[in-house]
Image (tube, rainbow, N blue to C red):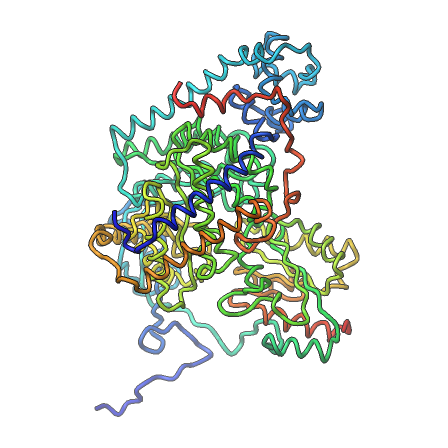
Amino acid sequence: MTDKTAVAQVDLKKVKPYGDTMNDGMTETAFTLPVPFGEEGSEAAKILAKKMGLDEPNVVYSKDQGGGYTFFIVYGKCRHTVDYTEIKVTKVEVEIMDRLECAKFIKEKIKRDVVIVGASTGTDAHTVGIDAIMNMKGFHGHFGLERFEGIEAYNYGSQVPNEVLIEKAKEVNADAIIISQTVTQKDIHITNLTNMVELLEAEGMRDKVILCCGGPRISHELAQELGYDAGFGSHTYAEHVASFILNEIVEKGRA
Amino acid sequence: MKSKLNLDPKVIDSARSCASRIAHSMQEFIDVHTTVSTERTVVRLLGVDGVDDVETPLPNIVIDQILEAGGLPRGAAYWMGNAMIQTGLCPQEIAEKMSAGELKITELPAAGIEEAKEKIMPYVKDSLDKIKAQTAKREEYLDTIGEGRTPYLYVIVATGNIYEDVVQAKAAVRQGADIVAVIRTTAQSLLDYVPYGPTTEGFGGTYATQENFRIMRKALDEVGEEVGKYIRLCNYSSGMCMAEIAAMGALERLDVMLNDALYGILFRDINMQRTLIDQYFSRVIIGYCGTMFNSGEDNYLTTDDAYEAAHTVLASQLINEQFAVLANIPEEQMGLGHAFEMDPDIENGFLYELAQAVMAREIFPKAPLKYMPPTKFMTGNIFKGHIQDALFNMVAVWSGQSLQLLGMPTEAIHTPHMHDRYLSIENASYIFNNARDIGNEVEFKENGIMQQRAQKVLKEADELLHEIEKDGLFTTLEKGKFGGVKRPRDGGKGLQGVCLKDEKYFNPFIAIMLGGEK
């Protein structure tokens, strides 16, 4: 038995990765280098890992990928620290209501049906995101907006031009437009999301609708920068989007 | 072979014959119609290629002129044959003159049908000879350097740049891949033309062009010779230009083509009349050139629930099989797609997946079934994702799937990096080798969870098919029975390119291709 303190306490002003001992900095990384398999290649991986801020790098595995490429798995001790106490993240600040609470909120505070249109717009062919939020079935046991009492949800699917979604929004007098973006290669989602805001502004509609976007690579901060009211990333379900929209309707006096 | 799932052959027969009646009834509609893209395919097969100075493909210029003049019901083959008689030019020269605004193909003196047919026959034969030479080349490779074992390891490349794709594809082959699919750029399926030439810009994939096919074919032949096995090339004969791409694929020796009208209707909102007509010609070409087609049923589960809607996948596979039969595609080329990715939190989900995969194998014993990896429930947790893929690989080898599209641990994050593909190939190779004969060794408990599951799915598929037969396929799609997606008969993209054939219409390729080797 030793009488030393068993576990060092974290210093939130100097946070490091944790492996099995406080501040050991243990980090794993994996990458491919365009160099042939061999000792020189492993050395290159080690040097690179040091430049990444990993002390005592250890190439635990390397594998020839053919054609002059090699894959590496490297462990090392991260020398950098983060001041956690200084961090500020913009998040969608709203109390999440479940489906039934949303229905009650609509009944009591909005007193009419709320109309939401959505699509995966631009060239994006993926419906998985918009379906998870809007379709009756929802995702992972969380029902979609179509199932919410008091919400009229219209899911127009994928590859819908922004212009078309705006037309649909007008047709059904939508309170909110929600857009899903899955493909992000070469920042195509940024171009498309920006285009939507510009079109709405040109139509004089931007101030009349609540505009949200979502997708695995989308953050609230990015969305706000692009001129959206909110952005939703992974682990978002229909109730998150609904809670935000319903609160906005009340806050903006559109009930 | 005795059914391990104790499936009732009478129910299978009932479902299959019902699907056959559904396909036949649709075929009556298909037979009397043609489309702009079907006719562009005819023109391409007659040797017309290239683009004008604003990148409009010549086949589009030819067909658009015929369409505007109201000549489409007669078919492009007639107009081309007639123009050859009247001008003494070849199809390519005729197309170039049309493009230059120097020729109105429908305003020439009109020769008889038989004369026009006779005039184009040498070009038809020439085209078919080129296709047959490619088919023979494939056979020769298979006879000499051979191929990988099933389940074939099927990987995708999707850099957007065909030359970068070549680098990735060759690396994948050296790592063990048997099939390389070049994913198309997003939205190509909705283009009513096929782009031209080599391309280096695409989003989430690379344009399918004949030149890109040629570049990748050459690369895969080279690396195949290097590793000592034939490497199959896959692309998409789907979307608005199904048949045109099938023709290009036949000419450039593609081995596998995604080809499924139902998929285009449901997930790309392509007009159902248009795409079912196009699918027919594309499948005739596919059947003729020895290419394998892949259907897209696995995608239903991105919009519907895998557990509850499993029978819709089987019903669709049976319909797809019968459409293929009508296009004279041998069973050995019917790469029906499936996998029923369920929420990984479902208790005994693995048993249901396995039951359904074995069921598909038993119902389509000779078909080169294509098994899809998980995508919908991949989260970005690459470590768990690797295990989800491993379970699917286990099902694939156990149930004797023919093609395994390899799941990537980084699914839901990005298109695969070089080492993502390596990790996936390693995962599959390990499992396929380590459990190679498990399917022959293990039987399932009488009336256990797996037998009951498969029997239930089969029974529901049979019931659904009978409903479809009653309603007709168009109405069924309008009602949203597949994938939970509703599509109107006259909605979607491409309906304006559909017309009724007139009584003198002919397509010289279909008859010969259906007739087989000539």
Residue B83 vs B172, above or below: the answer is above
Task: Give me the residue at 63% from left, 10% from top.
Answer: B111
Residue A50 visible from this viewpoint: no
Quarter of the image with the C terminus of chain B in it: top left
Residue A51 visible from this viewpoint: yes
Q: Nearer the viewer, residue B48 or B499?
A: B499
Q: Position of residue B83 (x, y in %)?
A: 62, 12
Task: Give me the residue at 25% from left, 50% from top.
Answer: B2
Residue B2 vs A135, above or below: the answer is above
Q: Position of residue A85 (x, y in %)?
A: 51, 79
Total labels: the figure holds: 0
Task: Give me the residue at 54% from left, 68% from top.
Answer: A236
Q: Position of residue B123 (x, y in %)?
A: 50, 15
Left/right placement of residue B161 relative to residue B217 reads: right
Q: Position of residue A38 (x, y in %)?
A: 25, 48
The answer to which image quadrant residue A105 occupies is bottom right
Task: Give me the residue at 64% from left, 33% from top.
Answer: B497
Q: Nearer the viewer, residue B485 or B291?
A: B485
Looking at this view, name the residue that lies furthest to the right: A204
